Image: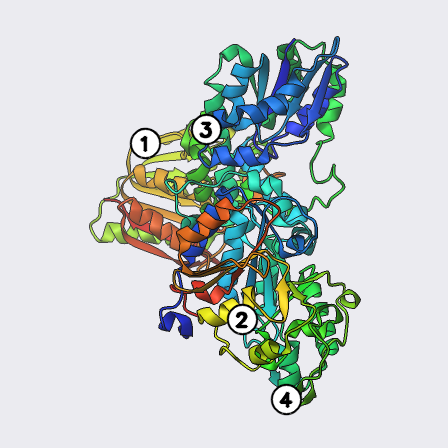
Amino acid sequence: MRRNRLSCVHLSNSIWYFERLVTTIRHSLIDVVTLRDLSVKNSKGPKLAFRFDIDIDPAISVKMATYLAFEGMPGSFYFLHTASYYGEWCGKTFVRNSKLRSYIREISACGMEVGLHNDLLGSFISHKLDPVDVLDRELDWLRSVGGDVRGTVAHNSLPVYGAANSEVFSECMLWKRKVYSKNGILPLSVCSMKQFGLEYEGTFFNAKKNLDMNKVKRFVGGEPIPDIRSQEWFYDWIVNNPIHNNVCDYQIWVISKEMWVIAGNNENMYFKWGVGFDDVIDFISNVQGDVKIMVVIHPVYFCEDVLV
Amino acid sequence: MKSFIIVSAPRSGSTSLCRILNSASDLNVASEPSPGLHEICRACWDGDSAEKYEEVLRDTIIKRLNVTQSGIVYGEKNVTYGPFIPLLSKLVDCVFVYLYRDGREVVTSLMNWHNNQFGTIYREAGIEDGVTDVAIKNSFGLEIQNDLSDFARPRPSNDEMTWEEWASLSRFEMCCYYWGHCNAELLDNCRQIDDSRYYQIDYSTVSSKEVSKVFDFLGSAGIPSDLTEELLDKKINSLGDRGFSEEQLFSNWMNWSSNKRRQFEKWCGSTMKSLNYWSDSAVNWRPSKYGEVWIKQFGADVSWFEWMYQGRELAHKDLKAFYYERKRGGDQISSVCDVGCGLSVGYHDFFKDLRYTGVDLVEENIKWCQKNRDNPNHSYLCRDVISEELNEKYDLVFSQGTIDNCYDVNGFIEALVMSSNKWVYITACRGWFPSLKNHSYNWNSKDGCFYNDVSPTEIETTLKSLGCKNIQIDPLKVRSDGTGYETRIIASVC
């Protein structure tokens, strides 16, 4: 077993911290829904969804799912198909990890939503894989294992590849352009969500009209340097993004031990950096109106007492 | 006649009772009308006071209970009403029918419900062995936020146990907790209201006569008893009645291992006693038809007992060698007790010079021995040693091939140890099972007895807990060609 890199640098919280979060949110009486339900337009009342981006540590995700089931609350879990826990290339053959099936089934059996954490541009760049083929194969497999997959969530942020992973879908194209990579032009807008039976893309980007291309260039070019623990970058990425707005009114991200960000969007310009548990609960308990909140959790941030 | 509420734990028969009562022309009984109060039920299990939800009750169940219809009394049932019995009794002039069923049957039913078809009982327990693909698929299809039934089930408070402890339990244990906790609360809540306002019915042994008492309690004219019988026979709301496979994926309680029995005892023992399913703990696991095979088939059949004795000659030789070895070593054995003696074939003459007591469950055998074995130093007792003490102690208490058929292996061992001054010698004739961690019970309803595989590990633990020393548990060769082994158990008693 190897200790995960985050616990080595003391960036992660304990699983108990997550359990406390869930229980407290349950008692706050806000309506907790799946990401799929959050994507529904014109919903009434404040709603919150837990989005789990499983970049690493699927085992801790299972623990989180069982706790959510204990509290009767839904969560939406997205498996990253380019992660080492998902599978690896053996020559020309992609072999999925033998434990992956049981992770997905356990999470699904808890009544959770399951989806694909989309790194289609990543797999194009590293292995020149056609995103349509990858989507077809992985969605088919996920559905055969158990999940009723209706949505994906893009991995990474736009500056990483010069385009967002969500932009493989025509519905999510942010603006028309060609992006070059070592394997050629990135395959953007090559398919539609509908053709794969998908109903939503869980980053909820809403492309802006009338882009300021100077600001766009700076952002895509890495100004400020993309870093999830950079206050300046995070603000530009979520709240004041030059390229897209966000359908969600608020996003709440855990980015370190007892460290959260509460970020609004272009319309409300809300931003609280480095807040703690109590501030998060306070915020959630006091929202009013037809507000959508997405709590983004990377399970690796709750691995303090877990060896992987 | 007053409106009424049927309360129970799930899988206890409330739907069956509901439909039977609804067959009466003067009753209108609704089964789980919406909204089902799942959320506030869970809130109360979690520690909220029922009084907090008075308004919700007034807007839902009380409204329905207060609707009058000439000549017809309204009633309803839901497993979520339990926490609200005292409050409802204050707010509305109604009565309650508290229905319960043997916890072992309910837990088995919950497990089969989960494993066979639904896959949604205590979802935090995850996917365990024995669940069908159908059940797993069904669980995938029901998102947790829509699974009000599972949400409404009680979970322990932090004072009772931590989440980690709860999460480490098997689904079986969680279901045991469910039945035990739920019925304890129901009993407690019923006892907070006037006796005249509730009626208890045990659905494990329900008959048309019992159901007619419920009709009487409700002031209803009822239905003909043959109709009640017909409806009871239908096993309303069983998996079969619902059109699902009735394959018993989870065994009934008579086939539970000793470990499952212990787990059930832990979570449900006290409620089983409160509901009078268990009074004397020694016979808790004895089925009603236990012992029939010896009584009906082999009672006092000399030729059968002689054939049985000859078939295990090596085993009997070993016991006799053990006795001689003790004698040679100066360990005086002057009294022996033969538990499961049958007709005392082989031993009435071997121990002719000793004080010998033969004990058997079958009265016919004992009477035959008393008549035909005329040694004045010998006596014969008809006893179930597990539940009835022998009033004497013996230097050697032995039992040949009886432990395999008893209803409580550890209880049997304890009974023999308690009756001994010096030694116990026991053989389990079904075989040698060194890899078994717990005793495995296999009930044969046709024979009315168990066929147990005893665990050497568990035997040793039991003997040690009774303070025994010189414990020897090993395979005993019973066939000269070496193909058959039994389990031999020897221990000295302090």
Residue A55, labelled with which disc? Answer: 2
Residue type at numbered disc 2: Asp
* Rendered location of residue A53, percent (x, y): 55, 66
Residue ranking furthest to the right: A195
Q: Chain of mark 4?
A: A
Marks 2,4: beta carbons within 8 A: no
Residue B377, labelled with which disc? Answer: 1
Crowd tier of the residue under label 2, counting other residues whose Cα lies within 10 Å: few below 14, some 14–19, many 20 or above: many
Label 1's element? loop
Of badges 1 and 4, nearer the viewer stands 4
Q: CA distance from mark 2 to mark 4?
A: 23 Å
Q: In the figure, is residue B484 to the left or right of B398?
A: right
Q: CA distance from mark 1 to mark 4?
A: 85 Å
**How many discs mark residues in the rendered view?**
4
Q: In the figure, is residue B256 to the left or right of B60?
A: left
B55 vs A264: above or below: above
Label 3's element? loop
Tell me whether marks 2 and 4 sit on the same chain: yes
Residue type at numbered disc 4: Gly
Tell me whether marks 1 and 4 sit on the same chain: no
Q: Which residue is mark 4?
A: A91
Which comes before the other along the chain, label 3 or label 1? 3
Of badges 3 and 1, nearer the viewer stands 3
Residue type at numbered disc 3: Ser
Answer yes or no: is residue B452 visible: no
Answer yes or no: is residue B397 visible: yes
* Rendered location of residue B41, percent (x, y): 54, 33
Q: In the figure, is residue B189 to the left or right of B252?
A: left
Marks 2,3: beta carbons within 8 A: no
Q: CA distance from mark 1 to mark 2?
A: 81 Å
Residue type at numbered disc 1: Asn
Task: Using the rendered view, name the quadrant where residue B151 is placed.
Answer: top right
